[in-house]
Image: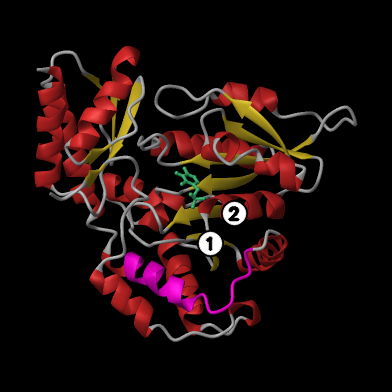
Amino acid sequence: MKLTDLRSDTVTRPSAGMRAAMVAAEVGDDVFGDDPTVNALQERAADMLGFEAALFFPSGTQSNLAALMTHCQRGDEYLVGQEAHTYRYEAGGGAVLASVQPQPIANRPDGTLDLAEVEAAIKPDDPHFARTRLLALENTIGGKVISRQWIADALALAKRRGLATHLDGARIFNAAVKLGIPVAEACRGFDSVSACLSKGLGAPVGSVLAGKREWVKRAIRARKILGGGMRQAGVLAAAGLYALENNVQRLSEDHANAGRLADGLGSVKVLVVELVQTNMVFVRVASGQCAALEAHLAAHHVKALVKPRTRLCTHLDVDPAGVDHAIATFKSFYR
Ligand SMILES: *Cc1c(COP(=O)(O)O)cnc(C)c1O
């Protein structure tokens, strides 16, 4: 029986077409800028995201950190959502490795920040304070698409107060597909954007960091410091290029499958299912039942990390039949 793995959209395996592209990739030494496939990926990514240049990274964590290091100096500060990946899920890398202090701001239920709070957190130029340099946003966040009007307002505030702006766009392609707009449109106005190739786009590894040409040149140094200078990386970049060319529009299938999953789980009386926007379904599970439900799902070839607020992700390797099987397995647990 086929496994339905809903733990994350990072669990996809490269498809036959993607593997063929990796095998056929022309390579060089990317630290010398010699790898034609890495260069092609970077150009394609820059073009799609709407920036002058882009840089290939082994992970989104490293890409976000390199962005922090390129925007900020030691002793600077960045404003960031309390729930943001860069703040919460990257092991404090900004503080640990970049000596950049985070100033977290509570995320509201829709993923946005209160801009009055953001503005109030900007420190005056006074030796008591860290220098506030950067506003970092995330889209999608927790599967939610951030309102375009709110982003415009946040970018206007940053501009007015002289802050640089970074978008952790790990799933910006999901946001753009959901909104039915070009991804460049969803990135417009930011100084830099990091986008994951290894989530819904289905590549085995990799992220791209985009920005102005001179800024990206400086980010190469940060990437080198962080150990992200790779050699014949074209083998990996080929997967990313394949993902950008083949797997963007199909994200709408993941969104439809997430909707199907939410509808099905919503029909189980005891389950509270949150409204779905993209490829993530959040379900409340009684804490005393988490371990038993997880084991029941696993016994029926459905993988999930079951918690009081369980996140279920759809992706390339989950099809409608897998979704229906997962729903049936939840139902058989609660019967
Ligand atoms: C996954 C993710 C990252 C980091 O990507 P890795 O490649 O896993 O390091 C950054 N931001 C968000 C929102 C993510 O979901």
Tell me which corner region of the image, top left, top right, bottom left or bottom right, holds residue 6.
Answer: top left
* Residue picked out by circle 1: 58
With respect to residue 76, does 49 lie above or below? below
The residue located at (67%, 68%) in the rendering is 217
Q: Main secondary structure of the magenta part?
A: helix
- Magenta residues? 228-244
The residue located at (27%, 45%) in the rendering is 178
Beta carbon at label 1 within 8 Å of ligand 1 = yes
Does dot 2 land on a helix, a strand or a loop?
helix
Near-viewer residue (117 or 136): 136
- Looking at the image, can residue 146 be seen? yes
Tell me which corner region of the image, top left, top right, bottom left or bottom right, holds residue 150.
Answer: top left
Within 10 Å of the Cα at label 2, are there few (<14), some (14-19), or many (20+) other Cα atoms?
many
Residue 93 rendering spot, x and y as whole percentages: 66, 43
Residue most extreme to the right: 127
Residue 253 rendering spot, x and y as whole percentages: 18, 50
Beta carbon at label 2 within 8 Å of ligand 1 = yes
Residue 88 rendering spot, x and y as whole percentages: 56, 33
Badge 1 vs badge 2, beta-carbon distance below 8 Å: yes
Near-viewer residue (221 or 14): 14
Report the number of discs: 2
The residue located at (14%, 18%) in the rendering is 334
Within 10 Å of the Cα at label 1, are there few (<14), some (14-19), or many (20+) other Cα atoms?
many
- Tag 1: residue type? Pro
In the picture provided, is 255 more to the left or to the right than 287?
A: left
In the picture provided, is 235 more to the left or to the right than 74?
A: left
Residue 161 rendering spot, x and y as whole percentages: 68, 37
With respect to residue 2, does 217 lie above or below? below
Compute the Cα span from label 1 to label 2.
7 Å
- Tag 2: residue type? Gln
Near-viewer residue (209 or 160): 209
* Residue picked out by circle 2: 62
